[in-house]
Amino acid sequence: MNTLSYKTISVNKETAKKEWVVIDATDQVVGRLCSKVAKLLRGKYKPTFTPHVDCGDNVIIINAKKVIFTGNKETDKVYTRYTGYPGGQRFDTPAKLRQKKDGADRILRHAVKGMLPKGPLGRRLLDNLYIYEGTEHKHEAQKPKAIDINQYK
């Protein structure tokens, strides 16, 4: 048996092959979309996945305004944030957040952040996520390839 053909491949920052992908979020359920995006950011769909290295893709989400929630989550789900001052706890529902300037961005980023590892690696991975509310994005120079997110599990 040739043992050289069974070596475990471990990539590092320099040898990781990172791609740019575009995902259309039209009529996608928020949680299901974000779990797949988190896997793409992490690199879990690649055969050379290494847990401690940023080996995932750069993900661009377009049409973020058109994501949907199932059930009554649009009005019943509550996002909590804290201003840092006494009595500064603020509450928002997804319906209220959508009316704000970067509402769809904050909804998707919050969901993806919870699905990434906590610590320095997770914060670095979140920098590879780009969210746009419309169909236009400014990353045409990177030649991103459009993928159908429904093909992934």
Image (cartoon, grey):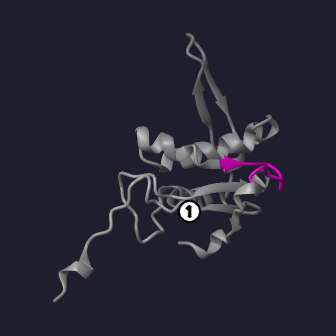
Camera-side residue of 13 and 147 = 13
Q: Position of residue 24 (x, y in %)?
A: 74, 62
Characterize the magenta stretch by its predominant secondary structure.
loop
Q: Is residue 41 above or below residue 75?
A: below
Residue type, mark 1 in image: Lys
Q: Secondary structure at mark 1?
A: helix
Instruction: Write down the residue under mark 1.
Output: 36
**Residue sitting at 25 percent across and 73 percent down?**
7
Q: Is residue 115 left or right of residue 127?
A: left
The answer, for residue 68, to whether it is visible in the render is no
**Residue sitting at 38 percent across and 60 percent down?**
11
Residue 141 magenta-highlighted: no
Camera-side residue of 134 and 72 = 134
Q: Residue furthest top?
A: 86
Q: Position of residue 32 (x, y in %)?
A: 59, 61
Residue 35 falls in image quadrant: bottom right
Q: Position of residue 9 (x, y in %)?
A: 32, 68
Q: Which range is magenta?
A: 130-139
